[in-house]
Image: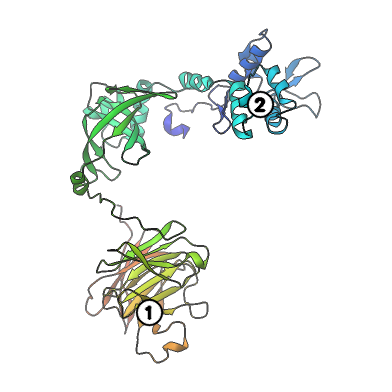
Amino acid sequence: MKGTYYDDEEPPLISPLVGNVCFASSQYSVCFTLKSFSQLYCQHFGGGFNPNELAKRLWGDMYFNATTRKFSRKPANSQMQRSFIEFILEPLYKLFAQVVGDVDSTLPNVLEELGIKLSKSEMRLNIRPLLRLVCSRFLGDFNCLIDLCVQHIPSPVKNASHKIENIWKGPLDSPLGEAMINCDPDGSLMVHTTKQYSTQDASTFHVFGLVLSGTLHAKQEVKILGENYSSLDEEDSRIMSVGRLWIYEARYHIEVNRVPAGNWPTILEVPPTEESLLQNTLWPEIHKLYGHVFELFSVASNRSGTLIASASKASKAENADIILWDVKEAKLLSRLSSHQLTVTRIRFSSDDRYILSTSRDRTWSLFQRQDNGSDYCRIGFTDKKNGIHSRIIWDCALTPDCKHFVTVSRDKSAVFWTIDLTNKCAQKSTLGPVTAIGPPLSLLDSITTVDICDITVNDNYLVAFGLENGFISFYYWNSQTFWSHLLDINDWYE
């Protein structure tokens, strides 16, 4: 990281001794550097020594000899602690122990000795807020962090050249590149956004970013470039209006009407109109569906658009159900129970007659639609006895004629299965009307995804496999010769 953001051949030293390291905890309102802690000692004892010199002796192999009252690099005995522990950590440990354990007995005396004053109501606070309050009164404000930023973080103008070289993919010698390198407030506007904060009512966003060049004005129209934007493909971009602008100063935010290059404003992003949402393929929300305990992992819809099937992450069978939803009524229809772990893939057949699912438990399940048109019943599944895959089954796909399906797994294999409802032996096995056809196909790496073309080629099914190493492999399949290799794509990004 230091090598990326610094020009020097030898990146700067990051060390508390240099002053560019801050010790902080927002949970306990603690923030200090070696220098700021040395200043606490200087104030408490009324001066008499240089806090900067003391700070140099509070890190590394430095020991304080109480007899000679001098610091040395070697301990006088085996019980002697390093100066950082003795002068910083031990006082903090003792202060924590007093607040947590002896609030009513010894804490008032300790606070009085340290010059910390608390009201009666503050002394009655719970342990955690009381600890935050005592630490903030003891260590003071976070001024040491401000000093660290001022002394060690380069100005936007000084750092602009190196920053642009690392984040800008365009030509540096272009007018826009030169404007950003010079941090020119009169150049073309360019803002690098780093974070979006949703408002409490979730109606809009506060956008935090750095103005690299130009001057950003409130109510100004800007072009927002998404992650997939390029000069050749502008699909991932849109025109929007800037709302209000603020500059944050500690806990205060000051509203401004313009922000020149080199500053970090907070921008109120005006919510787009419904027409703008439709133009930019952002769809308005219609319903929220609640039914899963954990986050969703797989979702599918039937071809007619009347049903949605969903499944969530699961570590036990009771959470591994597939839920069927009625789209029009936005209600739960039924639960399909079969798997023991997370369902990795759900597929509807092209005629919506079947639902096929695969799972991390190395099994697949096949469900058939009942006469009422919305309920599905399991007609086949694999178990430990008849399952072919030895690892997680990541994906599956049904053929367009709904007579076969294929499953793929982390074990690098693909298995073709046939569905024969006339099979008289269907009741004798958990596979039901399903039978594996031909030998499994073995590829060079784990197969993470699969799909089958909607049309056949000379009575062959065209099957595409996506591998974990990024390769894409195409195969033909038929019931006579089984698998036939067609081609591989292994230079997709070149």
Q: Quadrant of residue 205?
A: top left
Q: Residue tagged by mark 1?
A: 417
Q: Which mark is residue 60?
A: 2
Q: What element carries label 2?
A: loop
Q: Is mark 1 on a helix, strand or loop?
A: strand
Out of 394 and 174, give the one closest to the viewer: 394
Q: Which of marks 1 and 2 is nearer the N terminus?
A: 2
Eyeballing the image, is 27 above or below 111? Answer: below
Would you say residue 468 is visible in this rendering? no
Residue type pointed to by label 2: Gly
Eyeballing the image, is 368 above or below 2? Answer: below
Out of 453 and 303, give the one closest to the viewer: 303
Q: How far apart are marks 1 and 2 (CA)?
A: 67 Å
Image depth: mark 1 or mark 2 in front: 1
Picture coordinates of residue 124, whole percent (x, y): 64, 29
Left or right of residue 13: residue 271: left
